[in-house]
């Protein structure tokens, strides 16, 4: 099937639901979420077997948590027709579907990214065409087939969601050119291609979050949350910790807290050098180690850890351009570096992202000091600063008030148009209807005396 044919089918499906009411739209969104929730285990197994990325047990969690959290967030939102009224300003807002959304999805999340994209898009009465990562085509295709089956049961057009078969770079490029809006989740090359397609696009940049452990915070809690952030799905979440900065005088206590959580900490030069050599070649991450178990990574360096080790920490002496391991690793690995003053830690977090990547994406801080939260928030160039919680925030409402997302914009820092989580609201056009008010005109003579 050609891309042109798929676009035609998507437009027909989009046209078929143009008069759907809120209840009918929500039935579609719910059905998509439930079928993935019900098939969490087989989809997780398929993803791990096909992509060789991540951890089976963790992918089950993704496949249950994502549909539940997205539906819980979306279920009571008004997204059809008049969605907001402001009596004081005498305005109301009307949502209009965009049409056909082309979604480019990654191998790291071959089920939940297509699902999340579809749930947000369908909430606004759009159709989507998924262009999967070639490495994950089978898993994404199965995901789409399950959702299509549920749409048919509702009497809705199955072509509200389609997947590009036998995907190629050329097909993805054609999809981005011919659809009405592009949602591209991946690295900088993909983002650039999306913005160069001539179609309005949301691109999301790469992660590489720095996290600061502040003085006075519960070190044991920080260690426990670090394991969650770094170890989730073998570290392939783009918003999982990569660099953790800790007070220099608390090094021994911090390392002991990590060890108590099962983390193996490498501090000796020989071990650190061996891991660096294994992880990076010619300035690039070894793709064969991305998303692999900690034991596999350590063995590649000629070292060993106790069986069952899920996360390793590596002590470094420099950040940014002076340490290759400060680049995004996408594994169950966190590099750790000491700091003297809090201000120095914030500066290192900024420098690391600007020099080693991840600017605009996400950062984290463990602190009890609100002044430090504000200091960091005003200086670190990211769209999300997560306080006292794991940095992966895709399921936002479980730990904060952010909208749940599988695509996270990084703003102009990350060469993105959006510095927020991509939400259903970003996938509709909104008309503001403004009624006439009896307003006094602005008086220039008073304003500019």
Image (tube, helix red, strand yellow):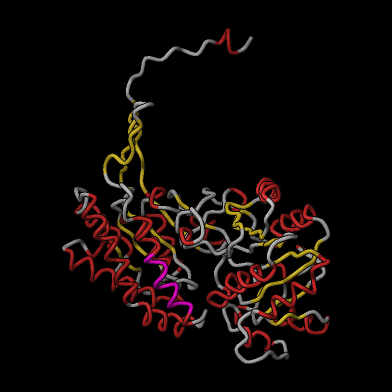
Which of the two residues, 97 or 232, is positioned nearer the viewer here?
232
Q: Residue furthest top?
A: 445
Which of the two residues, 191 or 174, is positioned nearer the viewer here?
191
Residue 197 belongs to the span the image colors magenta? no
Q: Is residue 6 above or below residue 143?
A: above
* Residue shown at 66% from the left, 74% from the top: 285
Which of the two residues, 260 or 19, is positioned nearer the viewer here?
260
Q: Is residue 13 left or right of residue 342?
A: left
**Range shown magenta:** 58-68
Which of the two residues, 250 or 65, is positioned nearer the viewer here?
250
Residue 66 belongs to the span the image colors magenta? yes
* Residue shown at 26% from the left, 65% from the top: 31
In which quadrant is the N terminus drawn? bottom left
Q: Where is residue 258? Give x, y as percent.
A: 69, 76
Q: Where is residue 33? Give x, y as percent.
A: 32, 66
| Number of marks drawn | 0
Q: Is residue 220 left or right of residue 5?
A: right
**Main SS, magenta residues:** helix
Q: Residue furthest left?
A: 155
Q: Where is residue 114? Give x, y as percent.
A: 39, 66
Identify the image quadrant of residue 243.
Answer: bottom right
Q: Is residue 17 left or right of residue 270?
A: left
In which quadrant is the C terminus drawn? top right
* Residue shown at 41% from the left, 57% from the top: 176
Q: Where is residue 406? Give x, y as percent.
A: 46, 62
* Residue shown at 76% from the left, 54% from the top: 347
């Amino acid at each position: 099937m050609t891309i042109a044919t798929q676009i035609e089918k998507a437009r027909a499906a989009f046209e078929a639901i143009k008069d759907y009411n809120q209840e009918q739209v929500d039935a579609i969104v719910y059905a998509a979420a439930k079928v993935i929730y019900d098939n969490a285990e087989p989809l997780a197994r398929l993803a791990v077997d096909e992509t060789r990325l991540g951890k089976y047990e963790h992918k089950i969690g993704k496949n249950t948590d994502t549909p539940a959290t997205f539906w819980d967030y979306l279920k009571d939102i008004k997204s059809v027709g008049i969605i907001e009224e402001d009596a004081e300003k005498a305005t109301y807002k009307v949502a209009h579907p965009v049409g056909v959304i082309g979604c480019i999805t990654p191998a790291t999340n071959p089920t939940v990214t297509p699902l999340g994209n579809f749930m947000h898009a369908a909430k606004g009465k759009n159709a989507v065409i998924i262009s999967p990562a070639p490495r994950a085509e089978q898993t994404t295709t199965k995901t789409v087939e399950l959702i299509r089956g549920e749409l048919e049961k509702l009497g809705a057009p199955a072509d509200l969601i389609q997947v590009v078969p036998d995907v190629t770079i050329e097909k993805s490029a054609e999809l981005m050119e011919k659809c009405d809006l592009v949602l591209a989740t991946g690295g900088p090359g993909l983002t650039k291609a999306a913005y160069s397609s001539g179609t309005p696009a949301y691109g999301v940049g790469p992660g590489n979050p720095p996290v600061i452990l502040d003085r006075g915070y519960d070190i044991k809690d920080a260690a426990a949350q670090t394991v969650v952030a770094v170890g989730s799905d073998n570290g392939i979440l783009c918003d999982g910790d990569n660099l953790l900065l800790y007070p220099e005088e608390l090094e021994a206590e911090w390392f002991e807290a990590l060890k108590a959580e099962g983390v193996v900490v490498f501090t000796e030069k020989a071990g650190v050098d061996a891991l660096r050599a294994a992880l990076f070649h010619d300035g690039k991450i070894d793709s064969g180690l991305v998303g692999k178990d900690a034991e596999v990574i350590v063995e590649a360096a000629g070292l060993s850890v106790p069986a069952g080790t899920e996360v390793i920490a590596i002590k470094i002496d420099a950040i940014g351009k002076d340490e290759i391991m400060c680049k995004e690793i996408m594994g169950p690995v966190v590099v750790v570096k000491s700091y003297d003053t809090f201000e120095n830690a914030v500066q290192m977090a900024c420098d690391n992202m600007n020099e080693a990547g991840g600017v605009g994406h996400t950062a984290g801080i463990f602190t009890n000091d609100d002044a430090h939260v504000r200091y960091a928030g005003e200086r670190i160039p990211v769209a999300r600063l997560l306080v006292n919680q794991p940095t992966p925030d895709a399921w936002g409402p479980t730990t904060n008030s952010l909208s749940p997302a599988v695509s996270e914009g990084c703003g102009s820092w990350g060469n993105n148009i959006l510095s927020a989580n991509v939400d259903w609201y970003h996938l509709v056009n909104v008309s503001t209807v403004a009624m006439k008010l009896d307003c006094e005109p602005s008086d220039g003579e008073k304003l500019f005396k």
